Image (tube, rainbow, N blue to C red):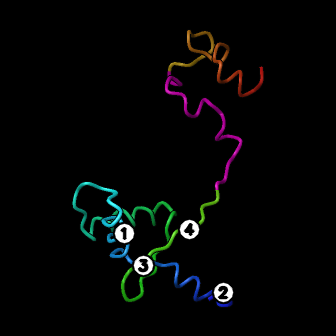
Amino acid sequence: MKEDPLAQRDASYVTSEEVAKYIHSKGFVNVPLEVEDVERVLNVCVLDGRLERRTTNNSSYRARRVKQVTSALTTIPCLYCPVRKDCAPGNEISPETCEYYQRHFDL
């Protein structure tokens, strides 16, 4: 298969039954999982963009390479701050006293 990229791609897909058998064989979970349960999880992964689904004879899945796209805005600590609603200039919680804000902007 080294010379045939399409064959390599086809070989990279697995069915939900194969995933369920693998999970059972490794003992990852202590509760019984049906194939339908595994398919639900796999479908969520498809919606999240982590898996591709091929719907030929029976559904099969394969992992997708996820590129991490970062933006400068996503690194601003205010976006993730749990007390941002209370933060305002002059308040006890404020940008002037925020160590994360100061560290982010090297103030």
Instruction: Compare marks 2 and 4 and give the one earlier in the sequence.
Output: 2
Instruction: Compare marks 1 and 4 and give the one earlier in the sequence.
Output: 1
- Where does residue 98 sit, x and y in percent of width and height? 63, 17
What kind of element bears circle 2? loop
Q: CA distance from mark 2 to mark 1?
A: 26 Å
Horizontal arrangement in the rendering, residue 7 relative to residue 40 (left or right): right
Amino acid at circle 4: Arg
Q: Which residue is mark 4?
A: 64
The question of residue 10 being in magenta is answered with: no
x 30%, y 56%: residue = 29
C-beta proximity under 8 Å, tags 1 and 4: no
Residue 43 drawn above or below residue 97: below
Amino acid at circle 3: Ser
Q: Which residue is mark 2?
A: 2
Q: Which residue is mark 3?
A: 60
What kind of element bears circle 3? strand
Q: CA distance from mark 1 to mark 3?
A: 14 Å
- Where does residue 20 sit, x and y in percent of width and height? 32, 69
Instruction: Compare marks 1 and 3 and give the one earlier in the sequence.
Output: 1
Q: Which quadrant of the figure has residue 97?
A: top right
Q: Which residue is mark 1?
A: 22
